[in-house]
Image: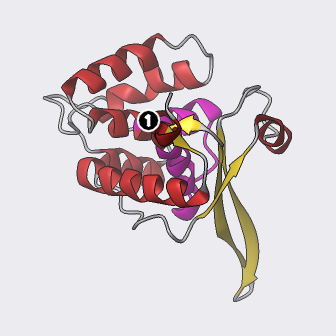
Amino acid sequence: MSPNDRVDTVEQARTAMAEVCHVLRRRGGVDLGDGGWIGLTLQTEEVLRREVASPYCRSPRGSATHSWSHAGGGTVKTDYRIAILRGLSRTDFSACCAHELGHIYQYRAHFPDLPVLVSEGLCELFKFTWYAAQGAESALEALRRLWANPDPVYGAGFRFAYPALLGRTLVGVMEHVEQHGHLPPPAMGGVTHG
């Protein structure tokens, strides 16, 4: 990997995140602006492992978090942040960023607590949508790789969530989950996300 292909600075990361947000809006209907409202840092493997307290992710490449603030007598989610492993290739950074933006979307939309399989599966749909926007060959390779992933959370989550995307846009799937607390049933018809 050439130094020009790596994401080593926050400036490079911001540019890549804005491009990912644009792709998710254009291909999936998910509008997160340019992502400028999301805190973004690049971290080492050690820091990410320490900060990601998930029992199912031992080697994280990214994480998404939020803070709680008190407003008007209630508690609201604020201060959305993404941390991604420093030095990833631009492609790997963008795919990881798309996944983490799936978490940010869920936080911001006040999704109900979802089973981890559903939550991570939805985020893998964000990643797939980004790959699919890179062209038919990229979409096919990503579909093969994500579908074959043996991981019991990420791979199984993608296999569980992907049928809900067929015949729908990414935002359509997300709005259904937001309203009903579960994935929509597989749709009849063709694929509209790609």
**Where does the magenta region start and end?**
97-125
Residue 98: in magenta span: yes
Q: Nearer the viewer, residue 98 or 186?
A: 98
- Colouring scheme, one of rainbow, by chain, secondary structure, one colour: secondary structure
Q: Nearer the viewer, residue 106 or 21?
A: 21
Q: Position of residue 67 (x, y in %)?
A: 74, 66
Residue 100: in magenta span: yes
Which quarter of the rendering shows the C terminus? Answer: top left
Answer with the quarter of the image where residue 163 lies.
top left
Dot 1: element: helix
- In-image side of 185 versus 75 (left or right): left
Q: Position of residue 123 (x, y in %)?
A: 50, 39
Residue drawn at x 60%, y 42% as measured from the top left: 114
Q: Is residue 184 above or below residue 101?
A: above
Q: Nearer the viewer, residue 116 or 127?
A: 127
Q: Residue furthest front?
A: 3
Residue drawn at x 57%, y 10% as measured from the top left: 150
Residue 185 appears in view: no
Residue drawn at x 17%, y 38% as measured from the top left: 192
Q: Position of residue 8 (x, y in %)?
A: 61, 47
Residue 118 appears in view: yes
Q: Residue furthest left?
A: 189
The residue labelled by disc 1 is: 91
Instruction: Tell me the amino acid under the disc marked 1.
Output: Thr
Q: Residue furthest bottom?
A: 72
